Structures are given as C-alpha cells and as structure tokens.
Image (tube, rainbow, N blue to C red):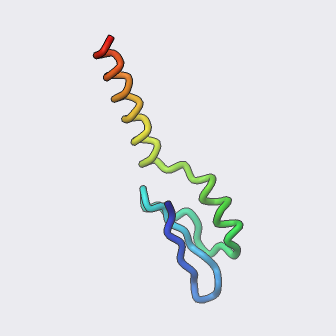
C-alpha cells in the first residue's frame, strides 16, 4: 500500500505505508508512479515474509 500526494506543480510523490520509505518524488505521471511502486522492495514486507516462513517451518518440524 502506498500513499500518493500531488504537489502544487502537478507532480506526484509516493510513500510506502509499510516501511515509510519515499518511493517517488516529483514524478510527472501516475504511470511512472505505478512502475516505481512495482519495483519497490519493501524491507518490512520481506522481513515479515521471512519470519512467517520461519514460524511455518518450526511448526512443521514440531508436528513431525
């Protein structure tokens, strides 16, 4: 999820709502915003996924 704002000059900014990193600043089109957001590798989401995999592996090992 991203927070998009429009600047007075018509350009856009985008910020990741998970890690609060600025993804784009002064971007001219929403299409470019979409592309930059799609390329964002959120460290918070990556960590959450790793922890979930670790928990699932631990639970699986405990049941076997």
**Residue in the picture at 64% in, 60% down:** 36
In this rendering, the answer to whether 7 lies above or below 14 is: below
**Percent from the top left, x then y, of residue 27?**
65, 73
Up the image or down, 38 lies above or below 11; here it is above
Residue 29 image-quadrant placement: bottom right
Query: Could you say where residue 52 lies in the image, as x and y percent from the top left?
Result: 38, 35
Name the residue at 65% across, 62% down: 34
Tell me where residue 32 sits by quadrant: bottom right
Residue displayed at 62% across by 75% down: 26
Please report the residue visible at 57 percent of the width from the left and 83 percent of the height from the top.
Answer: 7
* 20 or 4: nearer the viewer: 4
- Give the residue furthest to the front: 63
Picture layout, residue 42 above or below residue 22:
above
Q: Quadrant of the rendered structure where residue 9 is?
A: bottom right
Indicate the position of residue 51 as horizontal and vertical percent values.
Answer: 37, 35
Q: In this view, does 55 lie to the left or right of 16?
A: left
In the image, 8 versus 54, the foreground residue is 54
């Amino acid at each position: 999820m991203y927070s998009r704002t429009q600047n007075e000059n018509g350009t856009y900014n985008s910020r990741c709502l998970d890690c609060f990193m600025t993804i784009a600043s002064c971007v001219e089109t929403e299409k470019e915003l979409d592309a930059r957001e799609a390329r964002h590798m959120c460290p918070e989401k990556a960590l959450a996924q790793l922890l979930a995999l670790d928990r699932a592996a631990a639970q699986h090992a405990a049941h076997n």
